[in-house]
C-alpha cells in the first residue's frame, strides 16, 4: 500500500513537471510567433497602413539630433549676448560696454559659451572651416579686408541668414557695435570669406 502510494505521488509529480514545461514552452512559442509576426509586418511593404509601426530613432540619431539642437541653442546664446552690446562705441582693443573693437565683440561673445577664439580677426580667420555664402548660417563668422594692406582686418558674426540677405553684428570705427547687411556696397566689396567655428 505504501509502495503504491509512493508510485502514485511520483507519477503525479512527473505529470505536473511535464505539464508545466509544456505550458512554459507553449507560452514561449506563442511569444516567439507574435514577435515573428510583428517582425514580418514591420518589414513587409504590403501591409495595411494601420499596421505600420513607428520606428524609434536609433541611439546615434538621438545623439546627432541632440548635438544639432545644442549647437543651435549655443549659437543663439552667442548672438543674443553680442546684441547686448549694440550701440557700444568703438575702442581699439576694447572688450566691454565702455568700448569695443570688432574681434573683441566676437571673442567675448564666444568666450561666454566657453568657446575660445584668438583675439584678432586675422587669427580668427585661421580657425574652423571655410564655407560658401550660400551655406552660411546664424553663428558663422564673416571676414573682410578693409585696409589697403589686403589682409583680413575685420570680422562680423552672422545674426540672420536668408537666401536674399545676410545680416551680421560687428563693431565699426564710425558707428560702434551695429548690425549691417552684406548687401551694403562697402561690405559686399570688402567681403573675403565665411567660416564656421562651431
Image (cartoon, helix red, strand yellow):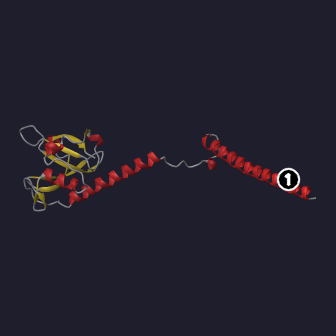
Query: In the image as oriented, which residue stretches furthest toward the top?
Result: 150
x%, y% of residue 131?
Answer: 26, 39
In the rendered structure, the answer to whether residue 21 lies left or right of residue 147 reads right
Query: In the image as oriented, which residue stretches furthest toward the right?
Result: 1
x%, y% of residue 4?
Answer: 91, 56
State how many labels appear: 1
Q: Toward the viewer: 110 or 83?
A: 110
Q: Secondary structure at mark 1?
A: helix
x%, y% of residue 55?
Answer: 54, 47
| Residue located beneath label 1 in the image | 11
Q: Toward the viewer: 9 or 178?
A: 9
Q: Is residue 140 visible?
A: yes
x%, y% of residue 53?
Answer: 59, 48
Q: Is residue 179 visible?
A: no
Q: Toward the viewer: 100 or 115?
A: 115
In the rendered structure, the answer to whether residue 26 lies left or right of residue 64 reads right
The answer to which quarter of the image holds residue 88 is bottom left
Q: Toward the viewer: 23 or 110?
A: 23
How many C-alpha atoms fall within 10 Å of the one at disc 1: few (<14), some, or many (≥20)? few
In the rendered structure, the answer to whether residue 42 lies left or right of residue 159 reads right
The answer to which quarter of the image holds residue 188 is top left
Residue at image location 49% in from the left, 48% down from the top: 57
* Placement of 163 over or under 94, stated as above or below: above
**Quarter placement of the N terminus:** bottom right
Amino acid at each position: 500500500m505504501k509502495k503504491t502510494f509512493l508510485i502514485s505521488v511520483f507519477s503525479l509529480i512527473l505529470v505536473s513537471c511535464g505539464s508545466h514545461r509544456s505550458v512554459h514552452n507553449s507560452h514561449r512559442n506563442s511569444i516567439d510567433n507574435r514577435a515573428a509576426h510583428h517582425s514580418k509586418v514591420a518589414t513587409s511593404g504590403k501591409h495595411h497602413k494601420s499596421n505600420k509601426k513607428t520606428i524609434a530613432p536609433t541611439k546615434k540619431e538621438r545623439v546627432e539630433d541632440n548635438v544639432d539642437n545644442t549647437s543651435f541653442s549655443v549659437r543663439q546664446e552667442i548672438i543674443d549676448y553680442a546684441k547686448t552690446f549694440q550701440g557700444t562705441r568703438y575702442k581699439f582693443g576694447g572688450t566691454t560696454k565702455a568700448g569695443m573693437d570688432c574681434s573683441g565683440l566676437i571673442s567675448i561673445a564666444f568666450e561666454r559659451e566657453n568657446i575660445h577664439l584668438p583675439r584678432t580677426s586675422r587669427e580668427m580667420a585661421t580657425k574652423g572651416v571655410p564655407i560658401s555664402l550660400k551655406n552660411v548660417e546664424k553663428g558663422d563668422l564673416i571676414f573682410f579686408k578693409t585696409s589697403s594692406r589686403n589682409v583680413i582686418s575685420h570680422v562680423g558674426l552672422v545674426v540672420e541668414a536668408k537666401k536674399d540677405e545676410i545680416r551680421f553684428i560687428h563693431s565699426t570705427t564710425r558707428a560702434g557695435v551695429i548690425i549691417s547687411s552684406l548687401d551694403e556696397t562697402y561690405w559686399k566689396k570688402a567681403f573675403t570669406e565665411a567660416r564656421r567655428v562651431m
